[in-house]
């Protein structure tokens, strides 16, 4: 069942991209550039309100996101 719920990105400077959405949780890609503009940092963030889980590795984040289904 699809929902009209439009999730808002978590707080944090940078660019947020919604990767996956379920009724009770979302997974985001968070891209930031260091103040000098020379390096970028990507994190993967799962929001399962009120919890927020941050990961450096996409596969690890996706695996946990899917396991939360159980």
Image (spheres, rainbow, N blue to C red):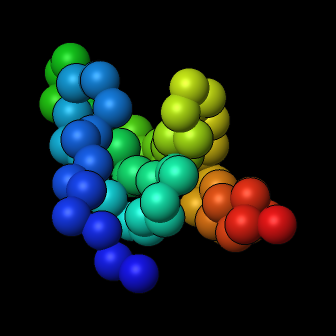
Q: Position of residue 57 (x, y in %)?
A: 63, 54
Q: Please state, as top left, top right, bottom left or bottom right, where the C terminus lies in the image.
A: bottom right
Report the residue at 21% width, 54% height from top: 6
Q: Nearer the viewer, residue 32 or 54?
A: 54
Q: Residue at x 25, y 56 (%)?
A: 5
| Quadrant of the image occupied by residue 61 | bottom right
The total of numbered circles placed on residues is 0
Name the residue: 27% across, 40% down: 9
Residue 39 vertical placement versus 18 (above, below)? above
26 relative position to 34: left or right: right
Image-quadrant location for residue 48:
top right
Q: Nearer the viewer, residue 68 or 29?
A: 68
Image position, residue 45 (x, y; %): 50, 43
38 left or right, relative to 50: left
Residue located farthest toward the bottom when viewing the structure as drawn: 1
The reply to whether residue 34 is visible in this rendering is no
């Amino acid at each position: 069942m699809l929902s009209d719920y439009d999730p808002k990105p978590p707080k944090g400077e940078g660019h947020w991209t919604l990767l996956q959405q379920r009724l009770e949780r979302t997974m985001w890609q968070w891209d930031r550039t260091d103040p000098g503009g020379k390096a970028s940092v990507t994190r993967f963030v799962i929001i399962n309100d009120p919890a927020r889980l941050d990961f450096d590795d996409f596969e690890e984040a996706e695996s946990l996101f899917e396991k939360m289904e159980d």
